[in-house]
Image: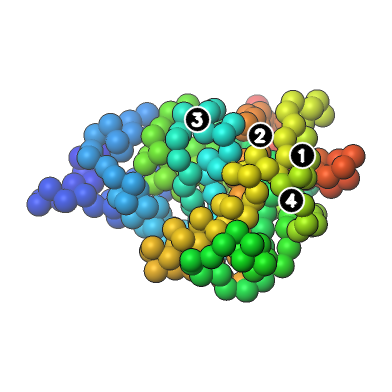
């Protein structure tokens, strides 16, 4: 496809047209080969404007805001995707699945990564320290993020990925975790029952609350704040693993893997 239809008669970028194209592709179960950045002069600010318009379309369809996701807070995810800076994207209520979860909607090319979710107990505004950000939370949760990029083969720039909500699709939400010592919390990721990777909470920028404080600052720049009840997933702790049809991916958190979260994908229809 061409993205030239996203430029108006005066040569200005039209984020509404771009958002409609991204939303239509996802709803139709299509990935896109041509990036916005391939066709247009496209800044990170433009990308967040598109993201906002995609969110507006989702909310107009009856979805409700539920929180935020952080992308690329860990070195392993930045290396996997050749992205050199973090970003963020919105979560809505339909993205949140109780563990053990089974994907029910259209999945394009889902991948799964273990994350620590932080739930806000009170409003958090910037500037704030990491300790202040953590103090604003009333709980931590074991999570699996299921990313599902609209860009074919996960080939994108930071700007293209941001426009697509940082590939946010679903979050399998598991049991509670202790808020203390999250940086030291061990996690093991397994694919179809076989362990493939290990990490700790420190993989998310040193501590999951580091990203939370950063997000508060980013939202403040857009006139927003983190609100009570918001769930913030703080970034992949390991690389993201493909979730094949008929497969399942799980993560075990804590000493001895005492807390688990799981997501599966239905078998391919014949």
Q: Which residue is mark 3?
A: 81
How far apart in space, not on screen, are marks 4 and 3 (Cα)?
A: 25 Å
**For the image shown, how many numbered marks are present on the structure?**
4
Q: Which residue is mark 1?
A: 187
Helix, strand or loop for disc 1: strand
Q: Horizontally, is 115 left or right of 32 in the view?
A: right
Height in image: 221 above or below 206?
below
The residue at the point 50 percent across, 62 percent down is 216
Labelled disc at residue 182: 4
Q: How many residues crowd mark 4 within 10 Å: few (<14), some (14–19), many (20+)? A: some
Question: Looking at this rendering, what residue extends furthest in the left direction?
Answer: 10
Residue 1 visible from this viewpoint: no
How far apart in space, not on screen, are marks 3 and 1 (Cα)?
A: 21 Å
What percent of the width, then of the height, locates residue 13? 21, 49
The residue at the point 48 percent across, 44 percent down is 86
What percent of the width, then of the height, locates residue 241? 64, 30
Q: Horizontally, is 255 left or right of 119 in the view?
A: right
How far apart in space, not on screen, are marks 2 and 3 (Cα)?
A: 12 Å
Give the mark nearest the N terminus, 4 or 3: 3
What percent of the width, then of the height, locates residue 41? 22, 40
Q: Horizontally, is 137 left or right of 41 in the view?
A: right
Near-viewer residue (109 or 127): 127
Tags 2 and 4 touching, CB below 8 Å: no
Image quadrant containing the C terminus: top right
How far apart in space, not on screen, are marks 4 and 1 (Cα)?
A: 11 Å
What percent of the width, then of the height, locates residue 154? 48, 30
Q: Which residue is mark 2?
A: 238
Image quadrant containing the N terminus: top left
């Amino acid at each position: 496809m061409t993205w030239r239809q996203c430029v108006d008669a005066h040569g200005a970028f039209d984020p509404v047209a771009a958002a409609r194209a991204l939303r239509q592709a996802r709803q139709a179960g299509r990935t896109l080969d041509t990036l916005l950045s391939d066709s247009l002069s496209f800044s990170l600010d433009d990308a967040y404007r598109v993201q906002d318009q995609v969110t507006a379309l989702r909310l107009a369809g009856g979805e409700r805001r539920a929180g935020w996701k952080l992308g690329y807070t860990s070195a392993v995810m930045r290396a996997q995707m050749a992205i050199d800076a973090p970003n963020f994207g919105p979560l809505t209520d339909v993205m949140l699945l109780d563990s053990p979860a089974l994907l029910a909607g259209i999945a394009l090319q889902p991948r799964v990564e273990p994350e620590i979710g932080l739930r806000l107990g009170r409003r958090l505004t910037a500037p704030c320290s990491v300790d202040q950000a953590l103090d604003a939370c009333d709980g931590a949760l074991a999570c699996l993020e299921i990313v599902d990029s609209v860009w074919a083969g996960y080939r994108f720039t930071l700007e293209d990925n941001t426009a697509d909500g940082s590939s946010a699709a679903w979050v399998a939400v598991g049991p509670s975790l202790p808020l203390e010592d999250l940086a030291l919390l061990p996690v093991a990721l397994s694919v179809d029952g076989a362990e493939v990777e290990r990490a700790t909470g420190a993989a998310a920028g040193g501590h999951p609350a580091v990203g939370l404080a950063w997000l508060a600052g980013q939202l403040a720049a857009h006139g927003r704040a983190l609100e009570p009840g918001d769930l913030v997933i703080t970034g992949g702790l390991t690389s993201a693993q493909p979730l094949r049809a008929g497969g399942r991916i799980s993560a075990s958190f804590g000493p001895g893997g005492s807390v688990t979260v799981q997501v599966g994908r239905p078998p391919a229809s014949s």
